[in-house]
Amino acid sequence: MQAFRNLGVMLAIALAGVAGAAIAAPPLPAFTAHYRVLQNGTPIGKATLTLAPGADGSWTFTTESQGTAGIASLLAASTREVSDFTWVGDLPQGLSYDYTMQSALKQKHRSVRFDWASHGIDVDDGGTFHFATQPGAVERHTVPLALAAGLAAGKTSFTLPVAVRDRIDTQHYAVKSKQQVSVPAGTFDASRVTRTDGGDAFDAWFAPSKLPAPVKIDQHGKNDFSLELESWSAQ
């Protein structure tokens, strides 16, 4: 009888450990955040970012944008991006990505599929491309989440394998300064994260002690686009 009691104690401890692992908190909680979108400093639309748990331990990150001013409004332009991923440690790892753009003039679709069993990535973006995975690979839509999760874990520099059109692009980011940033949602003491590898210019501001979503994102190129936080809520 003593042996059975000991076995029961051991099983209880083991099951408690499994249950604890299963309910471990993710690096970021679910949220919905609303932003105004600016082009070259002028408001042109609205965007909503949503992070939500999915099936079988996966998570879904969605960005929906709608033109509300200027040409974007006249063309009824809208975009929808949906990323499915899993958390591996304190970073996301991609499962799939779909991008759809619609307007009065055209439609566009782009997709990425990660097959971790066969270690391959398939991209459909004006042609089809196949290349090998790397551990922790994501697509570019999920990069802000990877940065937010890393900051919440105390990191100040990041190396991210990002699946682009026809290859893995190793991207480097680092915290460059601490700044007060004012956006429609308020003023935040934020960390400015900058891309440092010479790729497309990117800056994002995060306040990890206050909220899981970015406070502000700037993307620089032929046209400068910004997202500025208007409101957010935990799910």
Image: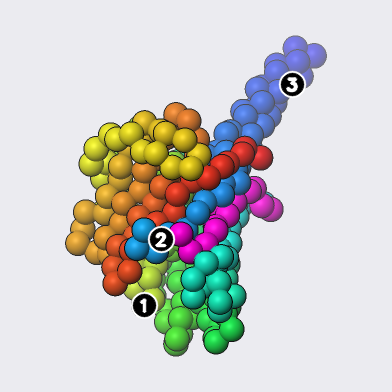
- Quick one: label 1 or label 2, which is nearer the N terminus? 2
Which badge, 2 or 3, comes first in the chain's sequence?
A: 3
Q: Comparing marks 1 and 3, which lies closer to the viewer? A: 1
From the viewer's perspective, tell me whether residue 138 is left or right of residue 231.
left
Other residues around mark 3 within 10 Å, as few (<14) / some (14–19) / many (≥20) = few
Whichever of labels 1 and 3 marks the residue nearer the N terminus, that label is: 3
The quadrant the C terminus occupies is top right
Residue at figure coordinates x 66%, y 26% from the top left: 16
Element type where label 1 sits in the image = loop
Name the residue: 53% across, 81% down. 108
Crowding around mark 2 (Cα neighbors within 10 Å: few <14, some 14 to 19, many 20+) is few
Q: Which residues are magenta?
A: 42-55
- According to the image, label 1 marks what residue? 166
Q: Residue furthest right?
A: 1
Residue under pointer 2: 42
Q: Amino acid at mark 3?
A: Gly
Quarter of the rendering containing residue 100 = bottom right
Front-lying residue, 184 or 165? 184
Most distant residue in the top direction: 2
- Per the image, label 3 sits on a secondary structure element best described as helix
Reading the image, the residue beneath label 3 is 8
Q: Quadrant of residue 6?
A: top right
Q: Measured from the top left, where is residue 79 in percent x and y?
A: 55, 69
What is the three-letter code of the residue carrying label 1?
Answer: Asp
Q: Position of residue 131 (x, y in %)?
A: 39, 75
| In-front residue for pair 93/50 | 50
Q: For mark 1, does the 10 Å Cα neighbourhood hold few (<14), some (14 to 19), or many (20 or more) residues?
A: some
- Cα separation between marks 1 and 3: 54 Å
Quadrant in the picture for the N terminus? top right
* Left or right of residue 81, residue 53 in this image: right
Determine whether 191 is above or below 35 in the image.
Answer: above
What residue is drawn where x is 41% and y is 33%? 188
